[in-house]
Image (cartoon, rainbow, N blue to C red):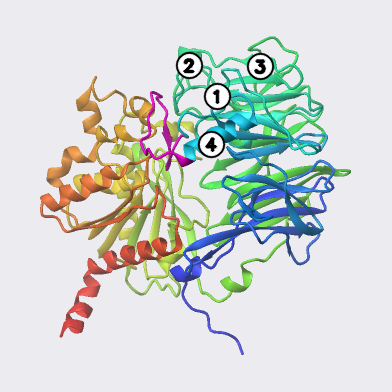
Amino acid sequence: MTRKKRSFTIDDLWQIERLAGVTLSPDTAQAVVSATRHSMEDNRSQASLWLLSTLGGEPRRLTSCGEKDGQAQWSPAGDRIAFVARREQEGRKDETPQLYLIAPDGGEAQRVSDYAPGVECFKWFPDGRRIAFVSWVWPELKGAKAQAKRHKEFKDRKETAYVTSEAQYRYWDHFVPMGRVAHLHVLDLATGKVTDLFEGSPYELTRAEPDANTFDISPDGRHIAFVHDPEPEKRLDHCFALAELSIRSGQVRELLNPGTGADAWDFNAPRYSPDGTRIAFTASHQGKMHTMPHHLGLVERNAAANRWQLLSAEWDHSINAPLRWSGDGQAIYFTAEERARCHLWRFDLETRRASVAARGGWVQGFDVAAAADGDVLVTCADSMNHPVRVSVHFGNTPALRIEAFNDELLSRFVFGTHEEVIVKGARGDAVQMWVVYPPGFSAKKKWPLLHSIHGGPHAAAGDTWHYRWNNHLFAAQGYVVACVNYHGSSGFGYDFLDSITHHWGEFELQDVEAATDRMLKQSYIDRNRVFATGGSYGGYMVAWMNAHVKPGRYQAYICHAGCFDWTAMFADDAYTWHAKELGAWYWDDAAKVASQSPHTYAKTMRTPTLVIHGQLDYRVPDNQGLAYYNTLKARGVDARLVWFPDENHWILKPRNSRLWYGEFFDWLKRHDPAQAPRKARSKA
């Protein structure tokens, strides 16, 4: 008997296995991916590693004991897989993440590091006998024993204050470890010995969550290229230099200095060529504008200092890390956005042209390995219609999907369709918008319109699944969902992205309003049931709309983690960018800053608003949401506050997410005129 399909719900969303971190074996025969499962009952998650055959077949679970087994990487010989985890083994539970090894044919994972400060990320040395990793250490100390002693003392301290003189002291949802910096280390697998490569030097990696893209190991294993902030006082908006460290001597050679003023460049994501003679990297001309795209750069290792090539300047796309070389050294792979999609590209070094190697949706991650007949690619990619899937790409043959983790679950539900439309927005420019329809949509009926306004602003409403703002979950509630890629969005060329700089709110509002006008012309949209919601910069936008759009056009707003007062926003972790984004420091030109701030226009705010915020949000501190809510209450505007003490900019815990969606939908229904008769009948 055929099972009747039903609508998608929040509990269904949290049953999906979330795939990430795919890595390809050296012989290209197998891949490893991390799969995270969530429990609504336990309100927690567990990540395991799975082995996939690139020829198809059933996946095989590699690990099941850790809480968050991730960052898997094959050894150069393909006989072991390293990963980072916090586990209990031999009667001892890891206090900090450590490195583990497991054979691809299974067995028990072996802990190979015992370093008190923990392991953030890592890469194998080509000899397979050593691993380079990043750890937060006290820079004045020498040796692993001294670090372990200080770590215990800090853990056992009774004081709770965070004390600093640093300009950059917190990031996203956590404080930078007090008094510590991120150093590169080498672990000898045979002896367990750990060597701090930066010990006694002024070098450190970024304080903004250093990952494996901040460094690379040369093919001969003798050098490590890395990027660092050369300024004495570290700041989030500083440009990074590219340097190379000799493993044997410990000497550091500066390859590329970021420069100053109009000549400043930001260098990142170094990657050695297969023959070790060149290093590819990303380069952004920050001296020209802080919004400049990341281009592809190349430096010859024997070149004079600061002599490098800018390869992709004529290509109007911004390149994402990581970079991966083709097996023959003639091309470089990376992801880049294009019109609300994110593809995997192959950039040919001779012709300086990019071609799509794997099409999105949204390619969330990839790996490359050389084979006898060319490169083999493996991708993790999702789309508006499905969560992340893993596929392998052999040459010009069609992609082969090599897992089916979520297929049976998703087969139970009926989803609506979606389409891409174009509206005439600010400056007369073409503005792209996604429209997602409810299941069972009929143009003969009237439907409410729900705007889902993306954050950033330099991001996009993409052809991607999204767990926190899932368009199909919105549409399943009976809404036609509109996702506008307003001016300032990424993936539509640099001019479009930079057009909003120093006058935030202006063009974006024109675009959203043009999209509303377009949708109201459709016979199936009920003009009395129009709503606007947004998170982060999208939250800023709905606050801005509350002040600048005539009351009644939108029945209600939802503001999640939205920016409200640009002066008070100086408490955020990215405060050093404010003058670049807004055009002035608030003490130099208060009027210019205030003119782009929703709070300045609070007197005209009258539309009911649900305000949601997390206390651990340091990108948009929760005082923004609280101030907006308090303002609405003081003005007598219908408002509701949902405040999470244990969430950051995103709502990540299953139970909190279910509550978030519940409050979200309840608020819309409460202000939906079509629900009023139903409420009246229920009271009677």
Q: Which of marks 3 and 2 is in front?
A: 2
> Residue flagged by tag 2: what amino acid is it?
Pro
Answer with left or right where residue 280 lies relative to residue 409.
Answer: right
Q: Distance between the residues labelled 3 and 2?
A: 25 Å
Q: Mark 4: give few (<14), some (14-19) or many (20+) Cα within 10 Å.
A: some
Give the extent of the magenta segment.
156-176
Residue at which label 2 appears: 232
In x, y percent, where is residue 121?
63, 39
- Dot placed on the residue nearer the N-terminal end, 3 or 2: 2
Residue at which label 3 appears: 308
Q: Mark 1: give few (<14), some (14-19) or many (20+) Cα within 10 Å.
A: many
Q: How far apart are marks 3 and 4 (CA)?
A: 42 Å
Q: How far apart are marks 3 and 1 (CA)?
A: 32 Å
- Dot placed on the residue nearer the N-terminal end, 4 or 1: 1
- Dot placed on the residue nearer the N-terminal end, 3 or 1: 1
In x, y percent, where is residue 680?
17, 80
Quadrant where the image shows the N terminus: bottom right
- Dot placed on the residue nearer the N-terminal end, 3 or 4: 4
User: Any magenta on residue 172?
Assistant: yes
Dividing the picture into quarters, in which one does residue 597 lie?
A: top left
Query: Which residue is drawn at the image coordinates 48% and 32% (left, top)?
Result: 494
> Residue flagged by tag 3: what amino acid is it?
Trp
Q: Are marks 3 and 4 in contact (CB under 8 Å)?
A: no
Most common SS among magenta residues = loop
Q: Which of marks 3 and 4 is in front?
A: 4
Residue at which label 1 appears: 139
> Residue flagged by tag 4: what amino acid is it?
His
Mark sitting on residue 151 = 4
Between 371 and 631, the one nearer to me in the picture: 631
Dividing the picture into quarters, in which one does residue 577 lie?
A: top left
Answer with left or right where residue 457 lies relative to residue 6.
Answer: left
